[in-house]
Image (cartoon, rainbow, N blue to C red):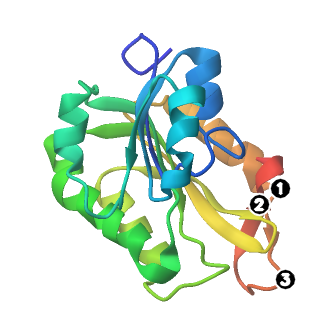
């Protein structure tokens, strides 16, 4: 169940294909969660209607949306179970959305139990997204439970939890479990990463 004891709620920014490599498909179809998904590519719209019936799908630019208005219209709980931000570091959209949340979502009391945030440092770091995102999440009380999750080319994502929504024991267990699995990434000296399937 969700943070409030009922089926969960998610916000999926950069949804892409409705089920292939989707973080939220299993939550929706398998666990009955509902949520907001945002995707720029309109080719997926018919598939969302068919494959993701519990999602409110918005086809549009994630950087320009009024998230407080959308979340209010969907009667989203203040304590939301999962946030995915999977946009493009190299065009600035990842930081633009997070800065929007920093200004207009977090201050309204919306909190997310778990967050996966793609900084994509292995592809691009034009906007210093990795460092700046970590500062924003820390400012709002999030704990970075897993840093620099790696996939294919290199480290691309951090995983956060909100300590008031996820038990401290669970967070500490996750950190401890993954600590010994971390390795220095050969292409990024000084960066300890963990392969996504080892988390």
Residue that carries the numbered disc 1 in the rendered image: 181
Where does residue 112 sit, x and y in percent of width and height?
38, 39
Q: Residue at x 53, y 58 (%)?
A: 86
Is the residue under label 1 in contact with that under label 3 (CB below 8 Å)? no
Q: Is residue 128 left or right of residue 193?
A: left
How far apart marks 2 and 1 lie (CA) works out to 6 Å
Task: Indicate which disc residue 186 carries.
Answer: 3
Closer to us: 162 or 80: 80
Where does residue 187 sit, x and y in percent of width and height?
80, 86
Circle 1 sits in a helix, a strand or a loop, which is it?
Answer: loop
Residue that carries the numbered disc 2 in the rendered image: 194
Where does residue 134 sit, x and y in percent of width and height?
43, 66
Q: Is residue 127 left or right of residue 72?
A: right
**Does residue 1 sit above or below 182 in this rendering?**
above
Is the residue under label 1 in contact with that under label 2 (CB below 8 Å)? yes
Q: Residue at x 31, y 64 (%)?
A: 63
Q: Residue at x 79, y 74 (%)?
A: 153
Work out whether residue 53 can be spotted.
Answer: yes
Q: Is residue 115 left or right of residue 80?
A: right
Closer to us: 136 or 168: 136
Categorize mark 3 by other alpha carbons within 10 Å: few (<14), some (14-19), many (20+): few
Categorize mark 1 by other alpha carbons within 10 Å: few (<14), some (14-19), many (20+): few
Task: Indicate which disc residue 61 carries.
Answer: none
Upstream in sequence: badge 2 or badge 1: 1
Work out whether residue 9 can be spotted.
Answer: no
**Does residue 80 sit above or below 32 in this rendering?**
below
Closer to us: 98 or 59: 59
How far apart marks 3 and 1 lie (CA) works out to 15 Å
């Amino acid at each position: 169940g969700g943070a409030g004891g009922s089926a969960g709620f998610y916000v999926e920014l950069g949804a892409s294909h409705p089920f292939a490599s989707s973080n939220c498909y299993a939550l929706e179809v398998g666990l009955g969660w509902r949520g907001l998904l945002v995707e720029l590519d309109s080719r997926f719209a018919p598939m969302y209607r068919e494959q993701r019936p519990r999602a409110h799908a918005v086809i549009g630019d994630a950087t320009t949306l009024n998230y407080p208005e959308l979340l209010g219209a969907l009667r989203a709980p203040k304590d939301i179970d999962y946030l995915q931000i999977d946009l493009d570091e190299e065009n600035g959209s990842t930081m633009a959305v997070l800065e929007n949340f920093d200004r207009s979502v977090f201050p309204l009391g919306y909190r997310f139990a778990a967050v996966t945030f793609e900084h994509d440092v292995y592809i691009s770091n034009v906007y210093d997204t990795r460092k700046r995102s970590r500062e924003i999440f820390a400012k709002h009380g999030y704990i970075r439970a897993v840093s620099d999750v790696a996939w294919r080319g290199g480290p691309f994502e951090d995983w956060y939890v909100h300590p008031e929504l996820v038990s401290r024991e669970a967070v500490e267990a996750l950190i401890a479990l993954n600590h010994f699995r971390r390795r220095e990434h050969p292409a990024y000296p000084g960066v300890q990463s963990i392969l996504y399937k080892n988390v």
